[in-house]
């Protein structure tokens, strides 16, 4: 069938058998001003190289392997945060919160893509190869972001702790000697500031709300608390801290604790006193949760490698 | 005499180059089609220069019509764009629209570059853009992006009845760049383009 003909519905309905022999009819709808017709699009599309291929950032400097692995760590935290929050699409506790949590997920995905594209330049991989074709042991995300969403209190506790940490980390990265990482931090911090505000407001609302909301918010914090310690470990990036590329996570702990204490006090909640779990995510050792997250995230790309649409 | 010289339209590279820039600037944001990417500050630059070599796609075409422009070297458009929010899903569509617009105006090669730095801010939105948003029913950003940790939130004006008596319904909206508000006077809900 010719793609250039545009038969009227009547022509198709009344004389289907004669269709192939009729002269191409003039387009039924004369193009409204500036509006592309279907025919135009079919003609133009082959001229567009790269259509369907992800648009990636311009990266002028190739990072060393160490810097690439650091970018991978930052990107994996953001990627797994995004994937977890993405589970709440159409399942949020109310429409507004559904939109809010998935908007946060979208911002995190944006940050993840920038970090992974940069890591990819140093490791000679594409962002998709890094996201979809690495196994659990190759991921460098922390245990906190792998945790299930649980109830809304747990979800908000996780978003609060993650975004508060990212806020301080990205603020520090603004002064990184690595220009690209500093640029990603400058881009993302404005978004993370908004995530912190959102999670803080819910923490206060739930903590200082009803007896039940208070109980659940406190329980959510306590479930997430063992995984906080891992965030502030310098050892995965010690050399890069010395060279001014990475931010020392340990140096952020004091301010993190102070800010969190202020929010929790306003929310009439307690800072949990639970010993830390032994988090080894930065070294590729993960909880069983990550395997399930990756299975869902990677299945399509692995079934149809290289597919675009 | 002058008339005959100018009678050959659009063959002057400088004229075509101007047309390409105009055409790219007029590409609309796919999610807020009332604004162009220039209004939004997404478009960072457009440069048009003579293409290094003749356009492959034009040469490859075996139609006789293509011969007219086949003789000249052609024009290459270099377009730099930046996303509003880092995860903005419209960037790929914008790339395709930019390529289409530049080619329609006579570019034989188009390359679209994505940059993240300096980070986009609503401060780059043109006054004309803000007026268009308001007329379209989306409240424009209410002030400058604050450098401090938390910006002062200013009253958001209802784009329908212009009352300042409005309340935030949802901190996040239909796209990453918007929040949902409602006017307490005319009771209409409306989108607000957040200061960022």
Image (spheres, coloured by chain):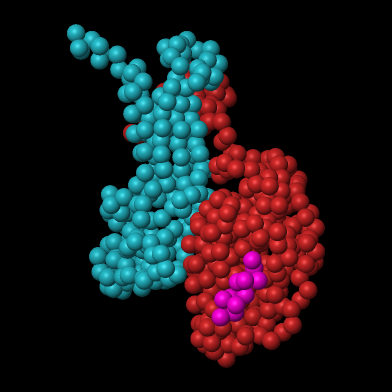
Chain colours: A red, B cyan
- Tell me the quarter of the image containing the C terminus of chain B: bottom left
Give the overall secondary structure of the magenta segment. Answer: helix
Q: Residue at x 76, y 76 (%)?
A: A277
Q: Residue at x 62, y 63 (%)?
A: A247
Q: Residue at x 52, y 68 (%)?
A: A195
Q: Which residue extends farthest front?
A: A242
Question: On the rendered structure, is A71 left or right of A279?
Answer: left
Q: Please state the extent of the stretch shown in magenta in the rendering.
A: A248-258
Question: On the rendered structure, is B118 left or right of A245?
Answer: left
Q: Which residue extends farthest bottom?
A: A211
x, y percent for residue B56 = 54, 19
x, y percent for residue B182 = 35, 69
Decide which of B27, A195 is in the foreground and name it: A195
x, y percent for residue B49 = 42, 25
- Tell me the quarter of the image containing the N terminus of chain B: top left
Name the quadrant containing residue A289. Answer: bottom right
Q: Indicate whether A153 appears above or below B70.
A: below
Q: How many marks?
A: 0
Residue A252 in the magenta stretch? The answer is yes
Residue A254 in the magenta stretch? The answer is yes
x, y percent for residue A99 = 52, 64
Q: Indicate whether B130 appears above or below B44.
A: below
Whether residue A11 is visible = no
Whether residue B49 is visible = yes
Q: Residue at x 56, y 31 (%)?
A: A49
Name the quadrant containing residue B135. Answer: bottom left
Decide which of A60, A217 is in the foreground and name it: A60
């Amino acid at each position: 069938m010719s793609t250039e003909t545009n038969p009227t519905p009547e022509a198709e309905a009344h004389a289907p058998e004669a269709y192939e022999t009729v002269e191409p009819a003039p387009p039924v709808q004369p193009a409204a001003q500036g509006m592309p017709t279907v025919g135009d699009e079919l003609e133009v599309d082959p001229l567009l190289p790269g259509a369907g291929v992800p648009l990636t950032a311009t990266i002028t400097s190739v990072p060393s392997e160490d810097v690439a692995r650091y970018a991978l760590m930052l990107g994996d935290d953001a990627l797994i945060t995004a994937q977890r929050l993405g589970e709440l699409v159409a399942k949020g506790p109310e429409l507004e919160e559904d939109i809010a949590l998935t908007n946060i997920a979208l911002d995190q995905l944006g940050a993840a893509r920038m970090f992974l594209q940069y890591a990819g330049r140093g490791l000679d991989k594409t962002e998709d190869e890094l996201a979809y074709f690495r196994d659990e042991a190759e991921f460098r995300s922390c245990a906190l972001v792998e945790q299930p969403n649980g109830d809304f209190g747990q979800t908000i506790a996780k978003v609060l702790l993650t975004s508060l940490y990212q806020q301080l980390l990205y603020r520090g990265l603004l002064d990184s000697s690595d220009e690209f990482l500093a640029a990603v931090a400058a881009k993302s911090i404005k978004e993370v500031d908004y995530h912190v505000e959102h999670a803080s407001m819910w923490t206060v609302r739930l903590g200082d709300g009803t007896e039940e909301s208070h109980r659940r918010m406190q329980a959510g914090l306590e479930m997430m608390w063992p995984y906080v310690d891992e965030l502030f470990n310098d050892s995965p990036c010690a050399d890069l801290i010395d060279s001014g590329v990475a931010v020392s996570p340990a140096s952020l702990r004091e301010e993190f604790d102070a800010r969190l204490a202020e929010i929790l006090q306003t929310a009439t909640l307690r800072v949990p006193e639970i010993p830390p779990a032994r988090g080894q995510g930065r070294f590729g050792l993960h909880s069983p949760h990550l395997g399930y997250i990756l299975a869902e995230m990677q299945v399509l790309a692995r079934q149809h490698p290289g597919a675009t649409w | 005499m002058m008339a005959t010289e100018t009678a050959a339209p659009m063959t002057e590279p400088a004229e075509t180059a101007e047309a390409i820039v105009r055409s790219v600037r007029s590409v609309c944001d796919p999610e807020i089609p009332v604004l162009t990417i220039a209004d939004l500050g997404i478009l960072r630059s457009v440069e048009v220069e003579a293409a290094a070599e003749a356009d492959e796609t034009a040469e490859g075409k075996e139609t006789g019509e293509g011969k007219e422009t086949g003789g000249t070297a052609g024009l290459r458009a270099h377009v730099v764009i930046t996303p509003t929010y880092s995860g903005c899903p419209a960037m790929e569509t914008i790339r395709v629209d930019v390529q289409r617009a530049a080619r329609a105006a006579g570019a034989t090669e188009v390359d679209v570059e994505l940059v993240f730095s300096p980070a986009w801010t609503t401060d780059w939105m043109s006054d004309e853009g803000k007026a268009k948003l308001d007329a379209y029913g989306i409240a424009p950003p209410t002030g400058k992006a604050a450098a401090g940790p938390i910006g002062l939130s200013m009253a958001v004006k209802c784009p329908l009845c212009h009352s300042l008596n409005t309340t935030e319904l949802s901190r996040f909206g239909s796209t990453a760049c918007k929040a949902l508000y409602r006017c307490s006077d005319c009771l209409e809900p409306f989108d607000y383009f957040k200061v960022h």
